Image (tube, rainbow, N blue to C red):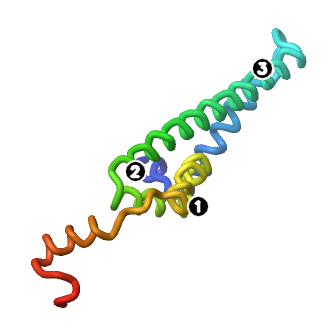
Amino acid sequence: MSKILKFPAKSGVYLLIAATATGVGLQFSPNSADSFLTSSSKFTTLFHGVLRSSRAISTVHLRSAKRILKLCEANKGFYVKAGQFVAALRQVPKEYSSTLSSLQDQAVPCHFKAIKQVLISNLGQDLSEM
């Protein structure tokens, strides 16, 4: 009995898709109380809910991307490099890549004197002595 209920991961995904499709189909199938118009209006309501949800997710992504951009600009250095890396990724939502892409060509430059001081303090000697 326990062997029957164990599915490989790939089969589990197909089972989940089939169960979801069956649930959606049963929800919209007209029965004696519902007419075709009510079923189509239910489908339209579901579609608009999904659309509204995707817009809300996009808004949240954009707001978060702007916050990350401010964080990268405030902390500079490694954070700017990390932001540039994230902007180049194709796997992140487009709101992040488009917002963080300003770090690639519009980043605030850092003067070499500040970099030189950090190198000297970390390495213990001047760059010309190496």
* Residue linked to disc 3: 42
First reached walking from the N terminus: tag 3 or tag 1:
3
Query: Of circles 2 and 1, which is in front?
Result: 2
Q: Alpha-carbon distance for marks 2 and 3?
A: 45 Å
Left or right: residue 117 compared with residue 7 = left
* Camera-nearest residue between 35 and 92: 92
Mark 3 or mark 1, which is nearer to you?
1
Q: Which mark is residue 6?
A: none
Residue 19 falls left or right of residue 114: right
Indicate the position of residue 75 as horizontal and vertical percent values. Answer: 33, 50
Residue type, label 3: Lys
| Disc with the residue nearer the chain's start (2 vs 1) | 2
Q: Determine whether 82 is above or below 31 in the image.
A: below
Residue at (66% x, 32% y) in the render: 55
Q: Residue 32: percent from the left, percent from the top?
A: 84, 12
Q: Position of residue 50 (x, y in %)?
A: 68, 31
The relative height of residue 54 versus residue 86 in the rendered view (above or below) is above
Tell me the tag on residue 90. Answer: 1
Residue 57 image point, x, y percent = 58, 35
Residue found farthest to the left: 124
The answer to which of 94 and 122 lies nearer the viewer is 122
Pick whichever, 31 or 71, lies toward us.
71
Residue farthest to the right?
36
Contact (CB < 8 A) between labels 2 and 3?
A: no
Does the residue at mark 2 contact the one at mark 1 (Cβ under 8 Å)?
no
Q: Crowding at label 2, few (<14), some or many (≥20) Cα neighbours within 10 Å?
A: many
SS label for mark 2: helix
Mark 1 surroundings within 10 Å by alpha-carbon count, few (fewer than 14), some (14 through 19), many (20 or more): few
Question: Residue 129 falls in which quadrant of the image?
Answer: bottom left
Residue matched to label 2? 72
